[in-house]
Amino acid sequence: MRSLFQWLYIFQRSKKSTFMPVILVTGCASGIGWAVAKTLQKQKRYRIVITAREKSLSKLREGFVEDDRLWILPLDVTSDESRKTTIRMIEGRWGPVNVLVSNAGISYRAVVEHMDSKEEILQMDTNYLGPMELIRLVLPNMRKVGRGKIIAVSSVSGMLSMPTMSAYSASKHALEGALESLWYEARPYGIDVTLIQPGFIRSNSFKKVYYTKLSDPKVALEGDYKDFYIHMTPFVEKLMALSPTTPKVVAQKILKVIRWEAPPLWVPATWDAVIFYYIRRLMPRRYLLPFLYMCLPKASSWAKDVSHKRKD
Ligand SMILES: NC(=O)c1ccc[n+]([C@@H]2O[C@H](COP(=O)([O-])OP(=O)(O)OC[C@H]3O[C@@H](n4cnc5c(N)ncnc54)[C@H](OP(=O)(O)O)[C@@H]3O)[C@@H](O)[C@H]2O)c1
């Protein structure tokens, strides 16, 4: 004879198995976001909301067909109205978001002197401020439900900065710092927080880097910082082309985190992310940057013909 508690447990288990978590993914029109959407589409136990900016929605509609568990919605992570509307629509139809995959991001390619405050703000808005606002919109209901997952696509640039990527690195460092705090704050409420850290990925996303007025190759390849652009751009592109990791591999990592009972805060998504992590941790700080500087292509000759560096 089963006791009342056993019957209750069986009832709860059966309810649990029909529960289909709602997953919201940002920036799905290309790269990692697209791969995550394709990966999750095959997982019949989730309801997924895949989103893109209005201008990229048609691309998403060509690649995906909506049904009772896949929904395509516009979402610009930098717009307060867009964020609120999207969350309101999801909650109205499917209930609270159970998993947020914050993936949308942009990357400026410019040395510090070639950024202005407007460009810095757009970088931070897209990679940090917007995602944080979205997190704030889904957290209250996750706390009410007593479970949830915040998964944010960060980068190796969130632990190490490279020349010509100051604003991008700053945005990912900010994301890493804030989500490290959130990990503690969300833990007692049953909410997992994870930073996916890709390094170089074999994809076309390098073609989508943003240039500023001053870092635009039309002008920057002539100026004082020309060596940085001449060497860094092909260097990054080469490492990306050589990387064994594709957006699909990163998407599989994200699926693993979604299924993971208690995932860690940091999940490296490429082999170089693991290497950079250990270099950063194990190498004495005094030698770290000179060592990395030496690894950059022809760095010893950068800016030689324009530098006024004093030897005395
Ligand atoms: N590729 C890499 O090597 C690499 C390495 C480390 C980390 N990451 C990170 O991985 C994430 C995905 O990047 P990816 O490589 O897949 O590059 P991607 O192909 O350029 O994808 C980025 C996506 O974000 C979307 N997006 C940009 N601004 C947006 C906004 N304001 N609102 C909503 N969506 C917006 C883009 O949409 P549109 O099509 O409308 O522009 C695009 O679909 C980013 O956070 C990036 O920083 C990438």
Image (cartoon, rainbow, N blue to C red):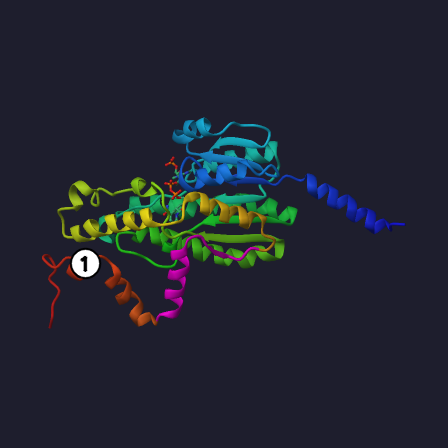
Which of these two is toward me, 256 or 73? Answer: 256
Residue 137 located within the stretch drawn in magenta: no
Q: Secondary structure at mark 1?
A: loop
Total number of numbered labels? 1
Q: How far across and how far down the image is residue 310, in percent?
A: 11, 67
Q: Is residue 57 left or right of residue 11?
A: left
Q: Where residue 24 sits: x, y (%)? A: 52, 39
Classify residue 157 by image quadrant. Answer: bottom left
Q: Quadrant of ligand 1?
A: top left
Q: Nearer the viewer, residue 16 or 312?
A: 16
Name the amino acid, label 1.
Lys
Along the line of sight, which residue is nearer the eye, 232 or 100? 232
Q: Is residue 80 left or right of residue 214?
A: right
Residue at numbered disc 1 = 298
Location of residue 89 with respect to 263 vertically, above or below: above
Instruction: Tell me the quarter of the image containing the C terminus.
Output: bottom left
Q: Position of residue 293 (x, y in %)?
A: 25, 62
| Label 1 C-beta lies within 8 Å of the nearest ligand 1 atom | no
**Residue 162 at x, y = what percent?**
29, 56
Give the residues in magenta.
Answer: 263-283
